[in-house]
Image (cartoon, rainbow, N blue to C red):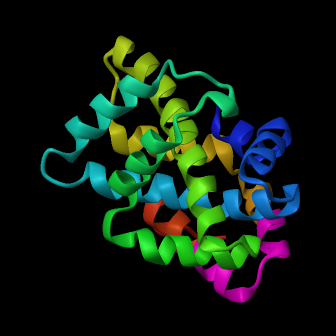
Amino acid sequence: MDIKDILSGSSVKQIAKAVGIDEKSAEAALKKAVPALLENMSGNSKKSGGAQALQKALMAHADDDDDVNQIDRKDGAKIISHILGDNAADVKKSLSKAGGLDSSKVDDLLSIAGPMVMKSVGQKTKSKSKSGDLDLEDLLKDVMKDGLDPGDLKKIASKIDADDVKDAAEAVSKLFGNFKK
């Protein structure tokens, strides 16, 4: 499973059904949630001991089940708490706005999306660590590139308001450094 799988198709349908929301709302919220999770994982990896802790967590989730219905939401809530830390309230508010969801639905969506993102990044971590070529910062950038290419960003931007575009641009900028057209 890669990031694109989480952001589209059957995963969105399964997540929407599990959370009890429509697919359009789930997709809108996920397209904000996944970059926010990756951005925060990147930030956490830069903290003292953060890279080692993140790598350990990623490896622990690399072989998790792909079935949305098998995801342990309590564990997912813990994952979200660790990843988002002090940014949790802002991220949840943004997701609520994007998907038109109440806070309990946002929590449910994140408790599913968090483990899915961990699995996706964990799988790449596992393959990179076997080759001895593991740099978590570069890995997270690669994962983000796998999930959102420039065409995807344009599609997303066309469907969201100016504040959301600014938020998305800031997230991408933090992950990849400043970029130019």
Magenta stretch: includes residue 155: yes
Please give left or right for residue 151 compared with residue 134 in the image: right
Measuring from the top left, give residue 127's x and y in whole percent.
Answer: 45, 17
Measuring from the top left, give residue 73's x and y in whole percent.
Answer: 53, 42
Dominant secondary structure of the residues highlighted in magenta in the image: helix
Please give left or right for residue 146 compared with residue 57 in the image: right
Please give left or right for residue 14 compared with residue 82 in the image: right
Measuring from the top left, give residue 44's x and y in whole percent.
Answer: 29, 54
Please give left or right for residue 25 compared with residue 88 in the image: right
Furthest-top residue in this view: 130
| Residue 117 sits in quarter | top right
Q: Is residue 153 visible?
A: yes
**Quadrant where the N terminus lies?**
top right
Position of 58 relative to 14 (above/below):
above
| Residue 180 sits in quarter | bottom right
Q: Nearer the viewer, residue 151 or 68?
A: 68
Q: How many labels were placed on the picture?
A: 0
Residue span colored magenta: 154-168
Q: Nearer the viewer, residue 100 or 133?
A: 100
Q: Is residue 34 visible?
A: no
| Residue 105 sits in quarter | bottom right
